[in-house]
Image (cartoon, rainbow, N blue to C red):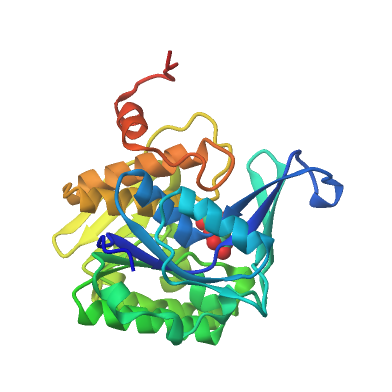
Amino acid sequence: MNSQKLDVVTIGETMGLFTPNKQGYLRYANQFSQSFAGSETNVAIGVSRMGYKAGWISRVGQDEFGKGLLMFLRGENIDLTFVKEDQDSPTGLMFKEYLRENQTRVFYYRSNSAASRLSPEDIDRSYISQAKYLFVSGITPALSRSCQLAVMAAIEIAKENGVQVVFDPNLRKTLWDEGIARQTLLEIAKQADIVLPGIGEGEFLFGTNDAKEIGEKLLELGAKVVIVKLGERGACAVTNEGAEFIPGYDVKRVVDPIGAGDAFAAGFLTGLLDKLSLSEAVHRANAFGALATQVKGDIEGLPERVQLIQFMNSTSDDVER
Ligand code: KDG
């Protein structure tokens, strides 16, 4: 393994992503741009762009998409020591559809994918235990029972070794039964130090859309910090010391909201790694989320340090000359 210690380790599936070059039903699309999308690698890339070291644990198919994905992630400086190439199952695929302004649909072709075969055997104890943060999302346990066990095994190792567990419920209703989803997400939330639910996910889990109440329920389960994401309104940080609302950024035109939550997580994690105060880290996370929504694609809008500072300090659309 790379001798440099990792700041963040993530586990999950990343797919080949096809984005149509025009709006409308996907059935009419005849040209696509191809890239890659996966919540956990989106987070890893956001962390890496800010100068921190992130690693990803997964399986990809031994196919062109798997090879392209590994090339792409190496280019983003992500540690891939524990990514396996699977000969028997393919890399998952995902298609986006821009039906009209602000209405995006997502279609998955990922059942029986290589990543859905992740299991506790893919989880290396020393790889996880030397990291500062373990980031997991609620997508991975939705993929298969063995994926769920892999996530739980990673969390157990993290907890035994003082690695902070960060959990984004990332509810994907099309991937699993709602009852099982709720029960599993709550089980993982119980093990996490930091939970980053969207307000809709909080409502799904607890039947309330009161951000403070959602935060308090997650604290009762065992989390130390809960940040409830409120979209363009910002976020609400809840700890045992109370709740604080941190307003978001005004985005004039949302081009693509997909990936904003991952950007938020990356911004928040780098804020913690920079040792910012909790509210400053959330403020940065809001900026990451806002930047991600202004660009088509999950990761294309993730900032480097200079662009982040420029964005957080700017009052108008600056032109760089
Ligand atoms: O958050 C955006 C990603 O979640 C998406 O682009 C791909 O990981 C993905 C998923 O499973 O939906």
Task: Give the camera-side residue of 186 and 204.
Answer: 186
On the question of residue 246 being in view, the answer is: no
The image position of residue 167, as x and y in percent, is 36, 67
On the question of residue 29 being in view, the answer is: yes
The image position of residue 103, as x and y in percent, is 66, 46
Task: Give the camera-side residue of 274 and 176.
Answer: 274
Is residue 185 toward the left or the right of residue 216 in the image? right
| Residue 146 against residue 275 in the figure, above or below | below
Is residue 61 toward the left or the right of residue 311 in the image? right
Task: Give the camera-side residue of 177 and 166.
Answer: 166
For residue 78, what is the image quadrant?
Answer: bottom left
Residue at 45% x, 61% y: name it. Answer: 40
The image position of residue 22, as x and y in percent, is 76, 38
The total number of labels drawn is 0
Quarter containing ligand 1?
Answer: bottom right
The image position of residue 222, as x and y in percent, is 24, 76
Residue at 42% x, 32% y: name it. Answer: 250
Residue at 36% x, 31% y: name it. Answer: 307
Q: Residue furthest left?
A: 241
Q: Residue furthest top?
A: 321
| Residue 306 against residue 135 in the figure, above or below | above
Which of the image's four quarters has the N terminus?
bottom left
Which of the image's four quarters has the C terminus?
top left
